Image: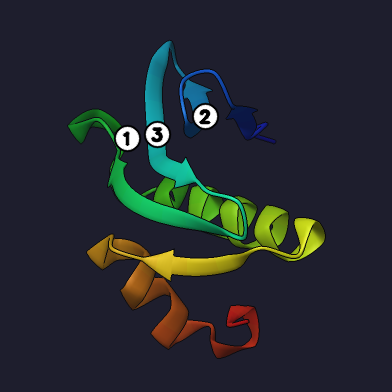
């Protein structure tokens, strides 16, 4: 199972698979988190990694009581497919 790491110093959620780094970049503010951009290397696309990153970010925001501002088109699409993750 892939471990999603919240790299706060890098302002991104990360997964390393097969030595390749996938990220969901964010900006934390006082009361919210802005989900900016998801990037998965071409060799890993279609394996659900971006969904794992989106789920982890939304779960973390909920746990911390942060509002979510979605800029990333992938996360926006993820929320349409998983409305239960909306806050």
Identity of the residue furthest to the left in this view: 42
Q: CA distance from mark 3 to mark 2?
A: 7 Å
Left or right: residue 58 versus residue 79 is right
- Residue drawn 55% across and 89% down? 83
Q: Residues within 10 Å of mark 2 (few under 14, many from 20)?
A: many
Q: Indicate which disc, 3 or 2, sits on the residue closer to the N terminus.
A: 2
| Front: mark 2 or 1 | 2
Residue situated in front as seen by the camera: 31 or 2: 31
Q: Indicate which disc, 2 or 1, sits on the residue closer to the N terminus.
A: 2
- Residue drawn 53% across and 49% down? 29
Q: Is label 1 in a helix, a strand or a loop?
A: helix
| Front: mark 1 or 3 | 3
Q: CA distance from mark 1 to mark 3?
A: 12 Å
Which quarter of the picture shows residue 43? Answer: top left
Q: Is residue 50 above or below residue 68?
A: above
Query: Which residue has dot 2 on it?
Result: 15
Q: Is label 3 in a helix, a strand or a loop?
A: strand
Q: Is residue 86 above or below residue 4?
A: below
Q: Name the mark on residue 44.
A: 1
């Amino acid at each position: 199972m892939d471990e999603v790491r919240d790299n706060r110093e890098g302002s991104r959620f990360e997964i390393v698979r097969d030595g390749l780094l996938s990220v969901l970049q964010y900006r934390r503010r006082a009361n919210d988190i802005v989900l900016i951009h998801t990037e998965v290397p071409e060799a890993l696309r279609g394996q659900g990694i971006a969904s794992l990153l989106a789920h982890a970010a939304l779960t973390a925001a909920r746990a911390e009581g942060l509002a979510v501002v979605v800029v990333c088109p992938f996360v926006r699409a993820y929320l349409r497919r998983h409305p239960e993750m909306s806050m």
